[in-house]
Image (cartoon, rainbow, N blue to C red):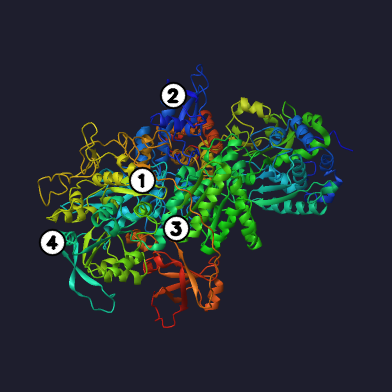
Amino acid sequence: MPTITIDGKNYQAEEQENLLSVCLTAGINLPYFCWHPAMGSVGACRQCAVIEYKNTDDKHGRLVMSCMTQVREGGIYSVDATRARQFRGGIIENLMTNHPHDCPVCEEGGECHLQDMTEMSGHTMRRFRGRKRTHRNQYLGPFINHEMNRCIACYRCTRFYRDYAGGTDLQPLARNNQVYFGRHEDGLLENGFSGNLVEVCPTGVFTDKTFSKHFVRKWDLQSAPSVCEHCAVGCNTAPGARAPGNGKDPILRRVVNLYNRDINGYFLCDRGRFGYDYVNSEKRIKNVLVACEKNIISSTAAPGERIHGEIHPEPAVKHLARHLAEVQQGRRRLIGIGSPRSSLENNFALRELVGKNNFFSGLSARDLQLLQLVDRTQRDARIHCPTTPEIESADAILILGEDIDNTAPRVALAVRQAARNRQKRQAQQLQIPLWQDASVRQLRVEASPIFFIGLEKPRLADITSATLLGTPEQTALFADSIAQLILGDDTGARKLAPDCRAQVEQVANTLRQAENPLIISGCGSRSSDIIHCAGKIAATLADTSSSPCSLYLACPEVNSLGLTQFFPAGEGDLEQLAHTLEIHSGTPCTLIVLENDLYRRADRHTVERIFNSADAVILIDTLLNNTARHADLIFPAAATAESQGTYINSQGTAQRFYAVCEGASYIQESWRWLVDAANFCKQKSPQLATIAAWRHSMDLSEALAANFHQFEVLEKIGPDENYRLNGLKIARQSHRYSGRTALGAKAQVAELPPHPDPDAPMTFSMEGIQSPAMTPLSAHIWSPGWNSNQSIIKFQQEINGHRLGVRGSVPIRRQPQPLPEWQLAASVPAKTSKTLTAVPLYRLFGSGELSVGAAAIASVTDIPFAQISREDAQRLDVTAGDIGQLQLGGESHTVEIRISDAQPPGTVGVPSGLPGLETLAALLPAPAQLERRSDREPGETP
Amino acid sequence: MPDQTLTKPLTKNICPQHKPPDIERYQDNGGYSGWRKALGMAPEDIVELVQKSGLRGRGGAGFNTGLKWSFVPRGKGSPAVKYLVCNADEMEPGTFKDRLLMEQNPHLLIEGMAIAAYAIEARTAYIFIRGEYHLAAVRLEQAINEARQAGLIGPDILNSGYSLEIYLHRSAGNYICGEETALLNALEGRRAIPRAKPPFPQVSGLWGKPTVVNNVETLCNIPHLIELGSEWYKSLGRCQDAGSKLFGVSGKVNKPGTWELPMGTPIREIIEEHAGGMRDGLKLKGFLPGGGSTDFLGPTDLDLPMDYDAIAKAGSRMGTGTIIVLDDHTCPVGLVLNLSQFFARESCGWCTPCRDGLPWVVEILTRIENGSGTPEDLDLLQEQVARMGPGNTFCALAPGAAEPLQSALRLFEEDFIDHIRKGRCPYR
């Protein structure tokens, strides 16, 4: 570790580190623009200049860019030297010659790195008397605003978008001070990580358009650590909320990244960043709804559909309480259906209320089995669930049947970084430090081996060494051959076509030789064979190398793996529930559905069997959905940003999220409705009494910890509601939060006390600890002089290190179990001329149940379509763009027909979860028929 | 028989009245004998010979050519693919020497490239030529075809087992493409911005392969150097620097032009004898010794020899060796403004001092020239000059752009003050 001197003080520096990182780690305020902790140095902005001295005799020194200067043992530097300060002030002065100084109307204002750095550099007087250059802005889609006049040309946007995220449609154009960062023409930014431009851009060129619709300054937002609910990766977020005033309920206004080294680092995907707006959707359930007596009779209504009206919560809760009383008296059955998109606490509360034998997962047998297989596979001691930095450092990656670009986007971004590992290794051989980003990237080395075997050509295809496309059955076959080959057995490989065989052999050889191989798979193909194969390959590799092999298994939803923990193998699926209900059809039955749309989970027949067997259906959910149409009573559930709880991500990491704001109207956490009902019961069984006594979210977390050994860690995540720091709670609002007394003044002059938080040691006010350095519960990433999200570097142990403080993410502890015995069964797909096999396709915008409720995401979500091969298109006599009728599992849907060369013949790709086709998701893969619609009216859209 | 008395190896075939020699005439006059000789030598011996000869790069930086070649990894374990790139993007203001060579004697460049490529074991070479050099491009294409047909380049050259392809690439036009790493980016179809170093092109250059980038004139020196040896080559110079050089003069002299003269020829001799002195009634006020991006020198520096170190010692650079003369009837502010406009326009836009500093310089100089300058503007200009100092920017463009400005501010301070005081350009 080199010892260096900066302005007369000694510091220990990391070997080979650049001086800027060292200064920032040491807490020295040194301004910069083009450097980014995840993207390294390129030396473009020249803002971070310092003086380097040759030795103690050298009094003059030499101006150097700290980001481009590798620290050396005994190095002497000065940040404070007048010459360095003047130069830095001069650079800002130059940068600002074309900047419009429009801070008051700029949405970046108040969290602008350019403002901060300008202040820090001490440039205050404007001496430039010329005209400023101006640009025309572009329409970049519904997510991002573009205001190029503010640009200071740090090149971070295109470095992130192109170099880091693999985008192609944003580039630096033109030259000199006319350089323009945009697309070749107006249009939606194609890359699924475009939202990060908002945070990567040091000023207001790229801002969040969804935030613009309900904009307030950063300092006026209240925030808390949260977890993204739009996939199972579990990225950490800092959503921001603020009430519009006059007694109106708070609005969730945006989501920004919250650094977690092991999961999301500095970046979120666009579904995660812009999906939050479902909370403000028109479909949002804010009040208790009750079904009116009569069923609707209308041509558009489904059988059993009802219309609902708002009622006061009290009679509704009493109604539920009456049902609970009847259950206690044995006159009624109570069935609970949980949800993979609800917290452990909510699921647990329902399970405790209905009893574990009456608690069902809300998943089809197939989905539950897949998840249980994921869980079982991860329990094998030879399997290691990798963190994001571990994914990034893998030297060979095999992706098996999982469209991670769309099902686990942040993982795909990490895989993209892994493609550069050979390049990085060469850089090290040439003694080029890895932070020298431009130097490293210009080395032309073969990409690190990344193989993709699956259904649809991935976005990652530009970095994959080999891509084998095929049906899930073929994928499993390839994977099984690879597993055999690693063991030296080529029986399976010999049966493959010669070109496939060559590729499979290449994959097996590469994996076998890799020091740090990584297998990625998941539930996306809905094939247990693929997961078995992934486990087998990883286990085999572990056996040959005698250290665990990294295997990332992507789960479909935010708490899929958490929900799975409640069910022993073979229990808890919806088919089983339908069966059980029919057997016990004599007793009246109340069905409580927790945050779940059963029509997305199982076939229509099974769902209707369930609804028909229950005489009361109670739904607790956030958005109106198909299940809501059948509910007698609907309770409004808090969304992630409005509640506290724990999710288990695909890595098996338990993560606590905290309420950012209180839900509007009567919204509350799902479990609280159950507790309320328990409290209205006059006679309470011991179980009901326990439930009735729950007051705090942590009561449930602790009960979970006590009841499930996997969840013992839950007790340790985050302090409980009684925690105090220096006698204070943690403030959700910043110390600059404005309008506290004025906000509601029109309605009421008296300042109302802040909404109490029974769950977390946090206040919905400005009072309390506001320093993110003191506790990770503070999500208001701010430091004096550092108002932008760049200030996260102030709260890391070192640059790119862990966040300071106790971590809110802890792996759950599962009993080790070896992989189950398994053999790939020979399958011969039946092929008739008309039948195709429908297989799931995934879309970043469209496949997420909640995110499509966000207006911006809905506006770019595809129309229902079905994708077939050219071969099948000819056979079926259809052309791309035709309107077709898709018959699948007894359902018939109008779709646009698309043709893809990559679609395996004999299959039809159906977008999973896409609005309009969401009821098909649970059925895939399944036999299907597709034909052109001849009766289409002109102009009719599907 | 090699002519050891040859003094003008670069221009011996050039006669303004005639078309450039085709391959027959070129060979009749001894052409390609250097290449034939080189093919009989070991590549590393050629590198050593060139290094010993003291040939310094004629593009402006004056780095020892042989030394540059010696950085290319060779032998076992070294990359199989290497490239030679000829930098023919002659865009330095006031410079027109490479154009003469390419238009009037294209085979000399082809021969020099063949030897250089052979020496660094490259089998592919590119000429990156300035887009406006249309005639040169046509003639070079023709020369390449002739050489290929004669078996002097192409596969298995003269049964030696060595193969070389030379491709001509016409630039889309950008001064920064003259910077060797920006040139490589442009050649690869990327944005023409300089690359970070290390890695240096000799290790990881074009498409990540070891690459040598040499100036046209540098490469034209090679054939005779190989043929006649390093002692002959050294003897060509009149000073420490070896060889002959194309020197040029532009400005209000009687006979602007370019001539091949020994290294170390005194500036006075170049201007007065070869360029015919100043036009009637004009006096020399100052001059840029090596193109638009070098510091002004004054009348007292006229007796300096044109060699790299002597000019550097006087506070400027020999650069491309093409002198721009400033006379006493031409406004120095206007001249510097004109140059600054060029550099501001040609900035690649990568680093701040250049991208945003040069347009500001233009803004200030425009005001001064138009009579609305203020005394504070001179301080501002000095500050901008300091911001663009060597090491403060990513590449040498801005420091080069600052050189005529900083020296003009010193040498012609009175003129600047006069503009400001009188509120107009006193030369108009």
Label 2 element class: strand
Residue B325 figure quarter? top right
- Position in image of residue B410 (x %, y %): 51, 28
Disc 1 target residue: A710
3D distance between C-alphas at marks 4 and 2: 67 Å
Label 4 element class: helix
What residue is drawn where x is 42% and y is 27%? A79
Respond whether the residues carrying marks 1 and 2 are from the same subunit. Answer: yes
Q: Chain of mark 1?
A: A
Taking depth in this image into account, of B248 and B420 the one nearest to the observer is B248
Seen in the picture, residue A939 relative to A131 is either above or below; the reply is: below
Amino acid type, callout 3: Cys
3D distance between C-alphas at marks 3 and 2: 49 Å
Quarter in which the C terminus of chain A is drawn? bottom left
| Furthest residue toward top | A57
Disc 4 target residue: A315
Respond whether the residues carrying marks 4 and 3 are from the same subunit. Answer: yes
Amino acid type, callout 2: Tyr
Respond whether the residues carrying marks 4 and 2 are from the same subunit. Answer: yes
Amino acid type, callout 4: Pro
Taking depth in this image into account, of B167 and B291 the one nearest to the observer is B167
Mark nearer the N terminus (3 vs 1): 3
Disc 3 target residue: A523
Disc 2 target residue: A11
Q: Tags 3 and 1 in contact by the CB under 8 Å rule?
A: no
